[in-house]
Image: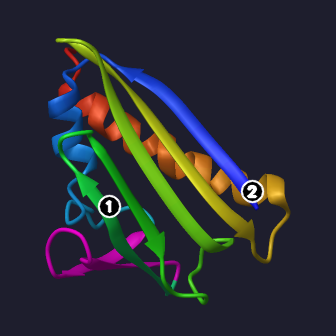
Amino acid sequence: MTVVNVNETVNASAKAVWDILSNFGGVKVGGPIEAFEIEGEGVGAVRTITMNGGKVIEKLDVLDEETLTFAYSILNDDCPLPVSSYRSKVIITPNDDSSCTVDWTGNFEPKGAEEETASGVVRGIYTNGIARARSALEPK
């Protein structure tokens, strides 16, 4: 099993970062994302992200606002990402009222790519997600 971890500080409150990152239905169409849909709400919700002519189907496994933790998994083996048996967990920890740490960890088996390549793709997803929260919340 391969593990990728990204741990970054965001200069915004933990609650504000939580509101952005934990929004399972907040995926925006654009760039490599061609389409997006979600079924259900809260734990058990399933989202389908269409990219590169394929679909990534993810399920929300944990959503705990008290501990600012959420987790999700990829359900389909034919997803266009170079991973299988994928599970991810995000923990947001307040540092003070105006900053927090995002700890985003994924576990998976590389699929159709070298471990280094698959890890780079996953790391990019995590850093881009954190960057999206940072650009929405940090003072310019």
Residue 38: x, y in percent?
21, 79
The one of 86 and 10 positioned closer to us in this rendering? 86
Residue 59, located in which quarter of the rendered image?
bottom left
Q: Is residue 116 magenta?
A: no
The one of 115 and 96 positioned closer to us in this rendering? 96
View extreme (right): residue: 114
Which kind of residue does numbered mark 1 sit on?
Answer: Val
Q: Residue at x 32, y 69 (%)?
A: 60
In the rendered image, the quadrant that contains the N terminus is: bottom right
Residue 135: x, y in percent?
28, 30
Residue 36 against residue 4 in the figure, above or below: below
View extreme (front): residue: 66
Q: Which residues are magenta?
A: 33-52
Location of mark 1 (residue): 62
| Majority secondary structure in the magenta region | strand
Residue 111, located in which quarter of the rendered image?
bottom right
Location of mark 2 (residue): 2
Which kind of residue does numbered mark 2 sit on?
Answer: Thr
Q: Residue at x 14, y 74 (%)?
A: 41
Residue 103: x, y in percent?
46, 35
Q: CA distance from mark 1 to mark 2?
A: 21 Å
- Marks 1 and 2, the one that precedes in the sequence: 2
Residue 94: x, y in percent?
28, 20
Q: Residue at x 69, y 51 (%)?
A: 3
